[in-house]
Image: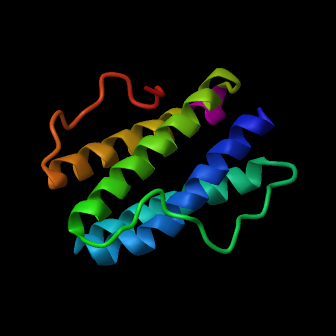
């Protein structure tokens, strides 16, 4: 369980970093701040659950240059899809409240990814199985 949660923690921390860039470049500061806050809450939850949480790097390398609204929205979708993928394995190793929290985290990421896809004009806006690696 610790390895799956550590992977989810790494995804949450990367999302927090990315949203600082997304908000500015996408022109969606309010939405990005709300998403960043949600990821901070999930990160804090995981830090409280892990016996020895890993420290996060001071910065992250973006998967591609984020230079405008289109690339910022693309990054937001990729971040949320990645967070959903990171939480999915947590479902298989948890029960009770921890499983409920994992399902909520995965669902929230899938909903945010759908919103970003809609803003970007990406079709289809939803994935048939959120959190499943393609």
Horizontal side of residue 79 vs 26, given as left or right: right
Residue nearest the observer in this picture, 95 or 134: 134
Residue nearest the observer in this picture, 60 or 30: 60
Specify the quadrant that holds the N terminus. top right
Main SS type for the magenta part?
A: helix
Residue 50 position, x and y percent, is 79, 48
Magenta highlight range = 96-102
Is 118 above or below relative to 124?
below
Residue at (56% x, 59% y) in the render: 14
Q: Quadrant of residue 89?
A: top right
Is 80 above or below relative to 34?
above
Can I make out residue 102 in this image?
A: no
Residue at (17% x, 33% y) in the render: 124
Horizontal side of residue 68 vs 78, given as left or right: left
Horizontal side of residue 74 vs 35, given as left or right: left
Residue at (57% x, 54% y) in the render: 12
In magenta stretch: residue 38: no
Specify the quadrant that holds the C terminus. top left
């Amino acid at each position: 369980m610790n390895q799956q949660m550590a992977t989810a923690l790494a995804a949450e921390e990367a999302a927090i970093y990315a949203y600082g860039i997304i908000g500015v470049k996408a022109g969606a500061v309010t939405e990005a701040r709300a998403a960043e806050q949600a990821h901070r809450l999930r990160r804090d939850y995981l830090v409280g659950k892990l016996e020895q949480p890993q420290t996060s790097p001071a910065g992250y390398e973006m998967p591609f240059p984020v230079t405008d609204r289109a690339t910022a929205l693309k990054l937001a979708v990729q971040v949320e899809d990645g967070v959903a993928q990171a939480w999915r394995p947590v479902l298989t190793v948890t029960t009770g409240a921890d499983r409920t929290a994992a399902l909520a985290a995965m669902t929230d990421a899938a909903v945010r990814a759908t919103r970003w896809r809609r803003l970007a004009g990406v079709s289809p806006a939803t994935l048939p199985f959120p959190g499943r690696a393609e």
